[in-house]
Amino acid sequence: MTRWLTEAVPRGRVAAFRTLVYLFVAADLVVFTPWVRDRVDVPGNLYQPLFIGRVLPLPTPTSAWVSVIFWALLSLALLAATGRAHRLLGWTVFALYFEWMIIAMSYGKVDHDRFALLVALAVLPTAGRARHGDQTRTEAGGWALRVTQISVICTYFLAAWAKFRFGGLDWATGSVLAKAIIRRGTDLADLIAQVPHLLLVAQFGILAFELLSPVVFVLPERWRLATVAFFYSFHLVTIATITISFAPHLVAMTSFLPLEKVRPVVALRRLLARRAARSDLAPEPPAGARTPADTRDGDDTPVPDPAPS
């Protein structure tokens, strides 16, 4: 079990995952959860903090407090994405984002798609130094990725457990997806809803998929990657039909992928180098040959060379 939990991975994979996670935190503030800043406009007595917010205890959000968290988290997350000071910046980003989520989820609705991302933020400071493209293997980084993977699968499995806990088999035989389509369905969802019994089959399929999700850990690598691709396709269908985004969860799920092979900066440099090489190797036009600059407005008549002085 210890060998499995600390299975060594390339440091480049840890570096890529770290950059992706911290860049998403910055994007989350301005794209997915900017509405958290509006929470301070509601009366303070509507703030019902989560259990951890009562235990610490954390202050009731104010406009100044939320603004400080927003700007500090935005700047520090961008700095952490560089991989510098990974412990100091990592723990600080985790603490600030954790408070950001407590504020967001203490007004009546708790999103379970944030769980794996929070776990990733909590373990990344322990992953050690890592540089993009480094193939040296690290057990500390492997542990950080493995714990994130476990939290991703727990999100699925515990979602099925919650369905049985609160809805029982009625969740699978009821009208859960039909209600979701009525509330927020797309044109594609309306077409699917017209197929008899398809929504019921989909509900049983969702339960089976969530309950069987832990199987991904015992599959060979090729089949494991194929299963992760299926997970992504499931969320693609979800957002295309009932417009529910699991963006934080999808970012955490990249912990399953060989991210060290994806190096956009290196790929861009190679592309620019190839273009420069092609332009340097382009043959010079022969003497007296016409070039596009030698013609005017489609006239094929060559422009005479100026008379020598």
Image (cartoon, rainbow, N blue to C red):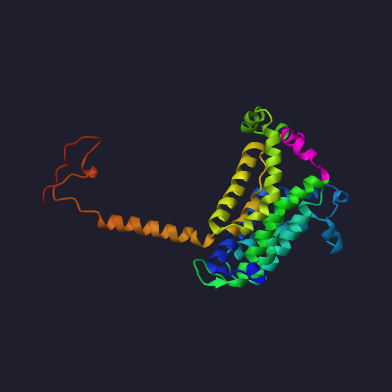
Left or right: 256 as drawn, with respect to 174: left
Q: Is residue 230 above or below residue 131?
A: above
Whether residue 68 is visible here, answered yes or no, is: no
* Residue occupying the far left of the picture: 308
The x and y percentages for residue 201 are: 68, 36
Left or right: 221 as drawn, with respect to 41: left
* Residue occupying the far right of the picture: 45
- Given residues 247 and 226, the one toward you in this image is 226
The x and y percentages for residue 28 are: 65, 52
- Given residues 96 and 20, the one toward you in this image is 20
Magenta stretch prevailing secondary structure: helix
| Residue 174 belongs to the span the image colors magenta | yes
| Residue 76 belongs to the span the image colors magenta | no
Whether residue 53 is visible here, answered yes or no, is: yes
Task: Look at 79% across and 48% down and name the residue there.
Answer: 162
Residue 186: image quadrant is: top right
Quarter placement of the N terminus: bottom right
Q: Is residue 184 above or below residue 54?
A: above
> How many numbered discs, if any?
0
The x and y percentages for residue 212 are: 68, 50
Residue 126: image quadrant is: bottom right
- Given residues 187 and 91, the one toward you in this image is 187
Magenta part of the protein: which range?
A: 166-180
The x and y percentages for residue 169 are: 79, 40
Task: Look at 77% across and 39% down and name the residue there.
Answer: 171
